[in-house]
Structures are given as structure tokens and as C-alpha cells.
Image (tube, rainbow, N blue to C red):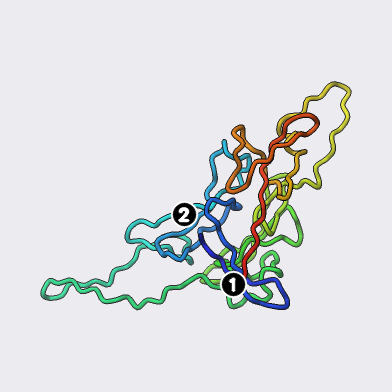
């Protein structure tokens, strides 16, 4: 499990929140690999097989390991070689002094003012620790903090599109189906049989947010669950995601 540090949106307390990347849970693509407490491991948002979900823009968090002799470097977003300081002495013995290098942990950009709640396109952000943010100009987009050139901790908010017919849910940290704007069925002169996709679009989730359709084996991406209901006398199956609250430190 990886922890991401982000600034709290509360005006009363500016204590940090911890956003958890839960292994096996859904994530929004594309996402950057995240550091963990173990320098030899990191978490990555990986796309699932096409037969598991109808959403190509969603993945699940998986734990990855670096190759032997490599460590995950958060600033590089990849595993890098661990340099050895070992030397061979005149007596042909190997001497390996202890490394005194400072390990750079993920941290906030010192130039950021106001935190994620003030996120705006091309604004300064902390790309190592900031979660995805809502786009104040469009609910069908979200803002992702991407690294700025020649700067270790600072980045800029970039606008990313959601998949068609979806909107960004800031609490779930993924784009979910927009159930509020789906049009009603139009009358037709001839008998009409709705397709499975249309049946799914009319279904709703009880207590969760709708992110897609279940497959034929009632499977859904990540830790979302398949809910089966009836719509116009037909069975409908939708994937529902139940939000996990961010925990304070």
C-alpha cells in the first residue's frame, strides 16, 4: 500500500491528508508509479484485460518490484541502479564504505499556495504527492499534476479528458458514468429491443457510483462490485464503486 501526502482542503486545519493507493483497487489511467515504504518496491496503475471491464481508461493498483541492484526513485518514476562505492585495496581486499547519501522522499513543492482545492489548469502543483483534482471549467475532465522540467518537486496541472459519457468523481479519484445526463428512451413506431449497453446505461447503483458494466461472469475492475437489477423487465448489470474516505494523519 502506498501513501500519498496532500494538503487538506479544510480552512480550519491545514493538517495533511493521506491518500492511499490500495492494492487491487481501481485507478485512473494514465497514472504515475508511486513510491512505497520499501525502496525496492513501488505501485503502478495497470490496465486490466478487456474481458474484465468495458472501461479502457481504468486500471488497478499493483505492487511491483525492482530488479536486484535497483531501487525505485520517485523523482524519476522508475527503478534505477544502486551505485556501489566499493573499492579494491592494494591488498586486493574489497572495501565498501557506508553510503551517506540523502534519500529524497516524495514531498510537496514549496511554491504551492492553497493546495489541491485551488487547482487550475497550468497552475503550480506538487506532482509527487498531489492526487487528481477536479477541473473547475469542465466536469468531463480532471487535472493531473505532471512534472515540470528541471524541477524536482514542482509540476503544473494539466487537463486530462474522461472517457465518453463519464464525469470525474474527486472522492473516488476516477471518472464515473454520468447517470444524470442520460437521455430518456424515445418512442418508436416499431417494436424496439434495447441493446445490453443501453440497458446497462439505465441501471443505477445503490449506495455507490457507477463506473461501467459487469462482464458475462459478473466481474468488475478493481474492488468495484457487480450489482444486478431489473430495468423494463430485463436484467441489467453495472459495476459500482464505493468511495473510501481519506484518512487524516
**Residue occupying the point 29% across, 76% down:** 98
Which quadrant of the figure has residue 38?
Answer: bottom left
**Residue occupying the point 71% across, 44% down:** 164
- The Cα atoms of the two marked residues, 2 and 1, are separated by 23 Å
Q: Is mark 2 on a helix, strand or loop?
A: strand
- Residue at the left extreme, as displayed: 91
24 on left or right of 201: left
Vertical position of residue 173 compared to residue 151: above or below: above
Tell me where residue 212 appears, x and y as whole percent.
Answer: 67, 42
Q: What element carries label 1?
A: loop
Say whether disc 2 or disc 1 marks the residue closer to the N-terminus: 2
Total count of labels: 2
Residue in the foreground of this view, choosing between 141 and 247 = 247
Vertical position of residue 216 compared to residue 175: above or below: above
Q: Mark 1 points at which residue?
A: 249
**Residue occupying the point 66% across, 49% down:** 241
Q: Which disc, if any, is residue 63?
A: 2
Question: Callout 2 environment at 10 Å: few (<14), some (14 to 19), or many (20+)?
Answer: some
Tell me where residue 101 appears, x and y as whole percent.
Answer: 37, 76
**Residue occupying the point 64% across, 61% down:** 132
Does the residue at mark 2 contact the one at mark 1 (Cβ under 8 Å)?
A: no
- The C terminus lies in quadrant: bottom right
148 on left or right of 91: right
Question: Callout 1 environment at 10 Å: few (<14), some (14 to 19), or many (20+)?
Answer: few
Which quadrant of the figure has residue 230?
Answer: top right
Vertical position of residue 5 compared to residue 201: above or below: below
Disc 2 vs disc 1: which is toward the camera? 1
Tell me where residue 170 appears, x and y as whole percent.
Answer: 69, 59
Amino acid at each position: 500500500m502506498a501513501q500519498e501526502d496532500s494538503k487538506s482542503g479544510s480552512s480550519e486545519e491545514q493538517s495533511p491528508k493521506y491518500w492511499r493507493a490500495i492494492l487491487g483497487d481501481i485507478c485512473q489511467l494514465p497514472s504515475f508509479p508511486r513510491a512505497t515504504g520499501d525502496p525496492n518496491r513501488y505501485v503502478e496503475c495497470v490496465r486490466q484485460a478487456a474481458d474484465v471491464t468495458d472501461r479502457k481508461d481504468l486500471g488497478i493498483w499493483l505492487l511491483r518490484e525492482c530488479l536486484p541492484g535497483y531501487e525505485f526513485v520517485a523523482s524519476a518514476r522508475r527503478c534505477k541502479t544502486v551505485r556501489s562505492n566499493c573499492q579494491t585495496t592494494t591488498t586486493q581486499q574489497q572495501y565498501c564504505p557506508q553510503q551517506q547519501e540523502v534519500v529524497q522522499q516524495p514531498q510537496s513543492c514549496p511554491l504551492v499556495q492553497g493546495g489541491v482545492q485551488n487547482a487550475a489548469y497550468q497552475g503550480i502543483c506538487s506532482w509527487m504527492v498531489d492526487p487528481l483534482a477536479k477541473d473547475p471549467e469542465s466536469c468531463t475532465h480532471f487535472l493531473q499534476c505532471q512534472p515540470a522540467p528541471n524541477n524536482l518537486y514542482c509540476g503544473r496541472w494539466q487537463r486530462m479528458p474522461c472517457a465518453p459519457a463519464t464525469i470525474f468523481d474527486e472522492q473516488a479519484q476516477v471518472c464515473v458514468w454520468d447517470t444524470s445526463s442520460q437521455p430518456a428512451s424515445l418512442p418508436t413506431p416499431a417494436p424496439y429491443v434495447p441493446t445490453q449497453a443501453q440497458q446497462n446505461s439505465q441501471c443505477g447503483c445503490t449506495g455507490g457510483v457507477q463506473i461501467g458494466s459487469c462482464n458475462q461472469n459478473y466481474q468488475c475492475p478493481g474492488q468495484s462490485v457487480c450489482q444486478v437489477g431489473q430495468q423494463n423487465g430485463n436484467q441489467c448489470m453495472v459495476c459500482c464503486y464505493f468511495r473510501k474516505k481519506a484518512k487524516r494523519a
